[in-house]
Every structure is written in structure tokens, then in C-alpha cells.
Amino acid sequence: MDPRPASDVFSDPLQVLRRLVVVVLVDAVVLWVLAAILDRFTLDGFGAAIGAALLIGVLNALVFPALARLTLPLNVLTLGLAAIVLNSILVAFAIDLVPNAEIQGLAEAIVVTIALTLSTSATSALLAIDDDESWYRNVVKAQSRGRETVNRTNVPGVLFLEIDGLAHEVLERAIASGRVPNIKRWLDDGSHAMHVWETDWSSQTGACQAGLLHGDNDDMPAFRWWEKDRNAPIVTNHPKDAVEIERRHSNGRGLLYADGASRANILSGDAAHSMLTMSTVLTRRRPIGRDYAAYFARPYATFKTFNAIVAEYFRERYWAVRQKRIDEKPRILRDRKYGLVRAWATVVQLDLQVAAVVGDLLAGRPVVYTTFLAYDEVAHHSGIEREDTLAVLEKVDRQIGRIEKATAEAPRPYRLIVLSDHGQSQGATFLQRYGYSLQELVEKACRSSSTYASSGDSAEASAYMGAGLTELDRDQTPVSRAVQAGAERLDIAHPADEDGAKAVTGEEPPELAVMASGCLGLISFPRQPGRLTLEAIEALYPTLIEELRGHEGIGFLLVDSAADGALAIGADGVNRLEKGEVLGEDPLAPFGPNAARHVLRTHRFPHCPDIVVNSRIWHDPTEVAAFEELVGSHGGMGGSQSYPFVLAPSDLGWPEGEVVGAESVHRVFRRWLAGLGQDAYADDAAGATSSEAPGSSSSAATPGASSAS
């Protein structure tokens, strides 16, 4: 890293002026060439071209940001493409103001705008203009100017940067191969150490973030589950369901409660500042458009977004076609619509949340937590270590490096902690292996045609797209209302009046509910009150249990026996969990030493399904069979999905015992905040320390506790 302060590295006015002159001259040449090509675009002399280039630059700097703010929801809905059209109108206006220059037609203006965008990008590349420098100038310095409210203190703030779905072992290999240079630099210079921890049985973002951010993920058996007492399902990333989950698990003192910020998470951690967070998108606070405007209202961001979206879309199409051409397996269908959804996760949301985090650190907020969705989204569809997936991980690492540089402008020192909430495991899906889904298997055994089924085979990023639109709709501007109505018709938003966590009344529930969460399957019988026992299930559906336990793709199933309590049943044995007895082969043995503990904990949840199914695990290579159509999956046990990481400053102590469960990690985080001098968490420090003593719930046996470089 450059030893000079960031404010010095990026503040040479003569250098900036020289580059502006070069850009204007290149843009003038481009305009001159376009005028010779386009029939309805004329320039009378090269002087008119220079004048047009100058005026376009001035209007882009002074007028375009205000226009972009007015049409902000439309810009978000179209991933920035509407801003290109808006800017084209501004470009046409600028050209018509220049003597001896004229342009007729919006199409011509759009062509000119795109050409200027591409020429500026090419000029930057030819002049070796560092994109990081441009980003710093246009994001960090732009936000720091004129900021009135800052929290100046010597007490360190903490930035929690979560890489969704990145397993500890995958990160270790990425470090060894040089794919994450910023993280590798931290480990090489000894500033940070990397630790592994083990999730609960439900290895997915909802349960993990409830534990990490609120210290409580009890009664969350999966990403989605059926609740008989409400006659309705819960899906964690639906806003009203997220609100209900946070209501159940928050005590008002979450990890971010002390003036913290939540950016692009499922739950808020009781943060005072929130954006793109599922549990708060329906909550009216201050006008949320300010957060989005911090990114979309700048010409730099608009053009950067446009270029990046186009590149990402074609990149996705290339890799999807290549997978089919070389017959790479496992793979799933990746349609053209998914290319745009992927662009949201890897371009728009990534840039939005980084800009928001920069704003938080410039304001001096004491604790910030953000979730980078990009890796998880691509790994689901491409595979956990495929080339295009690792390229996205590189992009996330680069953004982490940018955030690190931006801390130089902050009014307080910051400590950066990078972590994941869970990992992913790879494998051909259950449907691909056997030609039918878990739902079809259960329906056949039960001879039922009344089934509620839910899985996550659609992109998670689409939920965040919907969340962003719903959040913008809170401001209730005419544009946002019109955009929201259109988004609902396209089924890409969660409208404020959706049923969500509301109980269904006046309707007979389905006979079956079969829901998937990665390699975890949840089977409920909604018409039967309470949790059914093994004996009751066998009386109602005599062949179901035997068909499930004997299926090659199923590792074990959890049921409640009236005679023996919690049972983990496999093809060749039964683990009587509450009695500590194993008959035959233990079906939990392939899933690690803590499997029985995890399964028994889920058994005791009030909303534990009637039957919980975990897929089999194969070895050499390690694979699972997801019950939804995803190459990389998570949600149950088996493989690297259960082993995420925490990369933290080396002087922040990690428990000597092995850490199991997101609730245990939450206590470690609170202890760190208190130890850094954040007094709001001081009362929690003693409890956190005692809970991490060897032999406590956070120190069960787990392979490979921690490593430091």
C-alpha cells in the first residue's frame, strides 16, 4: 500500500487537470467522428466538438446529480439503465446549446452517450488511470465533502464485512492461489488471524445472522418452514417474515444497537441506520432515497454501473454456455433473466453497499455490519470454486481493500473484521441424481395431491432487488409509487401489503408441506395439530418413513417417537438422541462429532417440522444432494457448508476452545466491542468471557479450530 495518507495520494490538482484535458480532447474526437457517421448529428468544425465535450462535462457534473435523484427509484429498478437514457437527454440538450452543433432524436443521443462512456473508460485504461483512484475521488472524497454530522473519537469503530456463503476451506485455497490479495496481505503481515467456527444444523443466512447479530437463533429450523399454529410458511428473506423473525429474537440490544448501521443483511441487529435489510425495508425512518442517491446520483457511478452491468451480463452468458459446451458437471440451467439478477448482486448491490459503508465510516459510526451477497449468489449457480465464482470473490476482496483505504478519511480509527455466516457444499441435486424431487417422493409415498412446496431455486439476489424497491417505496414519491406498481406486476418486489408472516385464515391448509433449504428437507402435515410422532406418521402414511430412510440420497431423518423421543433414523441404524443409544450404524457419524448435538437442539424447537431430512454426504469428492436446483448449496450438514470463518485483528482474542454456533460468535463479537472501549457493550464483556471457557457451549469438538498467519 502507498505509505502516504490517502488524502495525499489522490489530491494532486495538476494531475487531475491534465487528465481532464486529455478526456475532453478524446471526447471531442469521438463526437467529431460520430457526427460524420450519424445522419442526424452535426458538428460544424472541431471547435464545436470541443465546446460540446466541455459543456457535456459541466452539465454532467452540475445538473445530472439533481436529475438522477429525482428519478432514483427508476434508476434502481433498471439497474442504472434509466439514468443512461436521462443522461442522453442531457447530452442532447448540451449539444443543442453549442453554436454550430445539432442532434436530432433520442436514439442518436443514446449512441453518443454510450460512445462517450466507452471512450472515457478506454482513455482511463490507456493512461493507466487507476480505477481505484477514480473510485476514491468519486465515492470517498465526494462523500466526505460537506459532511456535517461526524462522531470524532479515538475509540475504535468496527466494520464487520461478511462474505455470504464462503467456507473456511475455500477461502484458504483462494489465499494460497493469490485470488484474494488484500486478505492474504493481512495474514502475511500478521495484522489478522483466521479462525474457523461451526454453524448449527441450519447452515443458512437467516439462522446464522439471527445468532451473529442478535445472539439468539432458537426455533429457526431452516431458511423456510411451515408453522402450524399460524397456518402459514415463513421464508426468511421475505420482508414481513424477516420482521417477525427479528421481533422474536431481538431484545433491543443487538450487535448494532448502539448507533450502528446494517447494510444488505437479513436482520438488522437493532441498528439505528439501515439500508437493504430485509427486516427494516417496510419501516419508515428518514427518507431512504438519500442512501441510494449517495451512489446513483453521481455520473461516475451511473456510467460505471452501466459498463459493469453489460460486462457482467455477457460474462454470465459466456460461462453458462461454456459449462454446457465442455459438459462441466454438476451444473444447472442458467437462463438469460438470471444474468440480470446476477448483475444486481455482483454490481449494483455491491457498489451500493460499499458506498453506504463508506458513508458510515465517514460519519464515524461505531459499528457497521454488511453482507456481500455476490459470492454466494454465483456459487449457487456456477459452483463453489469455479473460475467465474472465484473471479467474483476477487471482486469482493477488492472492495474490501477499497473500504480499508477509505478508513484513512474516517474521524475515528477502525478495525476490520471479515467473516462468513456459513459455507457451501457442492454436488448434483437430488432431482438430477434420481429424476424426481423430494416433494414428488413424499407425495407418492403419501398418495397426496395437496402439497405446499417451496425451495430456493430462484436467485436470492432477486429478493434483494425487491427489498430495494420496497425500501424506496417507503418515501411514497410519485415516481416510486409508479415504479413499485410496475415491479409488483413483474413479480420482483415484496409489496408492503404481502401476507408475509400473517396467519392464513379461512382456508383449509394443505395436506403436506415439503420445503427445501439446500440439502435440508422439511416435511410437515399442516392438517394435523402439533408435531406428529413417528407412530402417528406410520399410522397415517405407512410407507413414508421406510421410503425416506432407505433412499440412497438421504443420509438421515429426524422424527419424534412417543416411545423413544428424538430419533435420527438412517438406512442401517437409529440414534436415540435423548437416551444416548445407537442401534446398528449411527446415521449421524458421517456428519461430524457435533451432529447429535445439532439435531437434538433442532428437535426441541417449538416449530420443528414433523420430519426433517438431511441428504447423504459422499466423499472423494465431498458432495451433497440439494433438494433445490442449486450447484452449491447450504442449509443442512455435510461438507464445508457448516464451517465458515472469522478473519480478525490478531490482538482480538479468539476462544481457546472450538467455537460452535452463531450465538457463541455473537458473544465473542460483543466482548471485542467492549474491549475496544465501546462502553455500550461493557456490561456484556464478563458474560461473553465466561461463556467461552473450555467446556462451555461454544467449545465443543470441531475439526481445525483456528490458524493464524
Image (tube, rainbow, N blue to C red):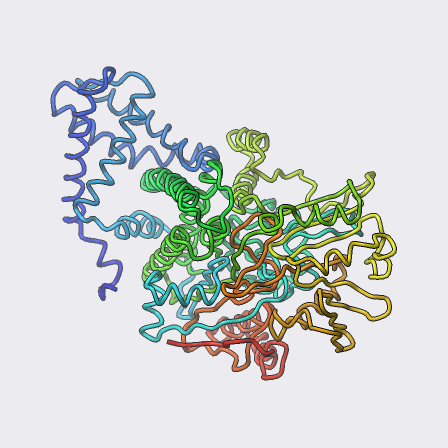
Q: From the viewer's perspective, is residue 577 above or below residue 179?
A: below
Identify which residue, 174 or 625, lies in the foreground: 625
Q: Is residue 100 left or right of residue 94?
A: left
> Taking 617 as reference, is 583 above or below it?
below
Judge whether 471 appears above or below 193 on screen.
above
- Residue 372, given in percent of the width and then of the height, sits at 46, 54
Q: Look at the picture and state if 682 lies above or below 267.
A: below
- Whole-percent x and y of residue 271? 55, 57
Quarter containing the N terminus: bottom left
Q: Quadrant of residue 247?
A: bottom right
User: Is residue 30 visible to us here?
Assistant: yes
272 sits left or right of 358 in the view? right
Relative to residue 115, is residue 414 drawn left or right?
A: right
Q: Position of residue 584 (x, y in %)?
A: 73, 74
What x and y, as percent, mark residue 563?
Answer: 86, 69
User: In front here: 197 or 419?
Assistant: 197
The residue at the point 69 percent across, 57 percent down is 551
Question: Which residue: 43% across, 55% down?
Answer: 357
In the picture, which quadrant includes the C terminus?
A: bottom left
Q: Residue drawn at (83%, 38%), measured in percent from left and top?
A: 506
* Quarter assignment of residue 64: top left
Residue 295 in view (yes/no):
no
- The total of numbered circles placed on residues is 0
